[in-house]
């Protein structure tokens, strides 16, 4: 079941990487400008805290990276969630290295900011680096097995196991009275019946 959920998360991760991730990367991508041309720098060389477009692009890119990090790090998530998009990125990068034209032609929506940003990440090697990081969970054997804590049924799952056995009330202790006639008499004290040696 967790691997099926991992497949769904892999599709979501690929969509997040292509749409907000590529869009944010394209908005943040700026070529270095000469020292006397500050107009080409983001926010005109000033503070980025006042540029809402740059902050939105940074938030989109940071959210994409955060989702990828969660899928890579959390042990309860199937390794397919991060591994399949990582294999896709590595395959695309390998195709780009073999044939640049074929690697670029396969990018959908190249006329839109999403496709252009994805193409920029491919050209700059960002997709290859991200793919290498995302396939790491696929090589961890413990990520493929179900953890023992996950195999334990839920609290409402097994009623017989959670049934409380009735505890019998403690019975009072019964004391058996001892009859005095059954006791062996004590021997007399040696000084009570001793003869008086001085009375002669």
Image: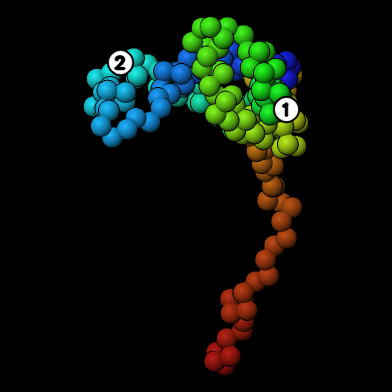
Q: Nearer the viewer, residue 195 or 98?
A: 98
- Residue at the disc numbered 2: 52
Tell me where residue 92 sits by quadrant. top right
Name which of mark 2 and mark 1 comes first in the sequence. Answer: 2
Q: Residue at x 62, y 74 (%)?
A: 189
* Residue 167 appears in view: no
Q: Residue at x 69, y 42 (%)?
A: 176
Tell me where residue 154 sits by quadrant. top right
Residue 86 is situated, as x and y percent measured from the top left of the image, at: 66, 26
Q: Under tag 1, what secondary structure? A: helix
| Quarter of the figure that contains the C terminus | bottom right
> Counting other residues with Cα less than 10 Å from the Cα at mark 1, is it few (<14), some (14-19), or many (20 or more)?
few
Residue 37 is situated, as x and y percent measured from the top left of the image, at: 27, 28
Q: Nearer the viewer, residue 33 or 67?
A: 33
Q: Nearer the viewer, residue 32 or 16?
A: 32
Residues under numbered marks 2 and 1 in contact, where contact means CB atoms less than 8 Å apart: no
Tell me where residue 99 sits by quadrant. top right
Q: Residue at x 63, y 79 (%)?
A: 190
- The disc label shown at residue 10, or none: none
Q: Does residue 9 sit above or below 173 in this rendering?
A: above
Instruction: Tell whether 188 sits left or right of 160.
Output: left
Residue 14 is situated, as x and y percent measured from the top left of the image, at: 61, 16
Q: Residue at x 63, y 17 (%)?
A: 104
- The disc label shown at residue 98, or none: 1
């Amino acid at each position: 079941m967790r691997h099926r959920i991992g497949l769904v998360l892999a599709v979501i991760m690929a969509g997040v990487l292509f749409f907000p991730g590529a869009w944010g990367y394209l908005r943040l991508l700026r070529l270095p400008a000469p020292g006397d041309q500050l107009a080409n720098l983001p926010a005109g060389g000033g503070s980025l805290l006042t540029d809402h477009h740059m902050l939105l692009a940074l938030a989109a890119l940071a959210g994409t990276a955060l989702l990828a990090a969660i899928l890579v790090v959390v042990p309860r998530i199937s390794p397919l969630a991060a591994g399949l998009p990582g294999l896709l990125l590595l395959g695309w990068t390998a195709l780009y290295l073999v044939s640049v034209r074929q690697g670029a032609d396969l990018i959908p929506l190249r006329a839109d900011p999403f496709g252009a940003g994805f193409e920029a990440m491919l050209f700059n090697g960002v997709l290859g680096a991200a793919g290498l990081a995302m396939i790491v969970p696929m090589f961890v054997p413990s990520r493929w097995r179900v953890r023992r804590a996950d195999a334990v049924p839920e609290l409402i799952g097994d009623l017989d196991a959670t049934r409380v056995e009735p505890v019998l009330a403690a019975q009072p202790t019964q004391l058996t009275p001892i009859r005095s006639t059954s006791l062996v008499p004590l021997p007399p004290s040696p000084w009570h019946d001793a003869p008086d040696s001085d009375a002669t």
